[in-house]
Amino acid sequence: MNIESQKLLQTLTRMARLYSVLEESLVAEGLAMEHVDVLALGEVTQAKEALLSEIWAAEQARVEQATALAETLGIHDPNPTLSQMSARLPVDAREQISAAQRALAELLDRCRERNQGNMALASSALERIETMKSNILGRNGNNAENYNAQGGRNPINEHGGRLLSERA
């Protein structure tokens, strides 16, 4: 295994560790949202931002290392793929890089699924808040009672239809 392929393998392994920590952070984020733990959510969000910054830096290093490896292997493609490079690597290096790539892809898929679950949880919470706000302000009532035929607003009895005035 040459130096460039070793560097690439180390970077792929580092990225897999970072994505593993990101997955744990996404689990913690989901739990914090479920328990409405604002402090924990803030801490997890800050940790997640730092992780994403590290992942971005590792990805930039991976691209540089892949390009250097491709040049060493005689591949003159501006965007070389690991598949192209693997075909020209010794068997042991090919298997190690392939295994690291598969592990990284699996972690990435799991992180994506957890993140989508967290986004769905946040969206449903925002929908419930919007519904509650509409109920409190009386926006969910019969529109015929709130507006006249010309589209103007009818006076609303303060004791019916809403819990708070819109000015509050």
Image (cartoon, rainbow, N blue to C red):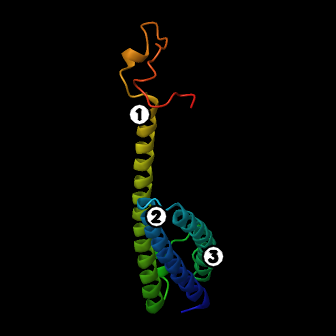
Report helix, strand or loop for mark 1: helix
Percent x, y for residue 156? Answer: 45, 18
From the image, tell me which residue sits under label 3: 61
Q: Residue at 44% of width from left, 43% of height from top? A: 129
Q: Residue at 46% of width from left, 7% of height from top? A: 150
Percent x, y for residue 88? Answer: 49, 83
10 Å crowding of disc 1: few (<14), some (14-19), many (20+): some
The mark nearer the N terminus, 2 or 1, is 2
CB under 8 Å between discs 2 and 3: no
Query: In the figure, 35 relative to 69: above or below?
Result: above
Give the camera-side residue of 112 and 133: 133
Report helix, strand or loop for mark 2: helix
From the image, tell me which residue sits under label 2: 32
The mark nearer the N terminus, 2 or 3, is 2
Q: Residue furthest front?
A: 159
CB under 8 Å between discs 3 and 1: no
Give the camera-side residue of 72 and 93: 93
2 vs 1, front mark? 1
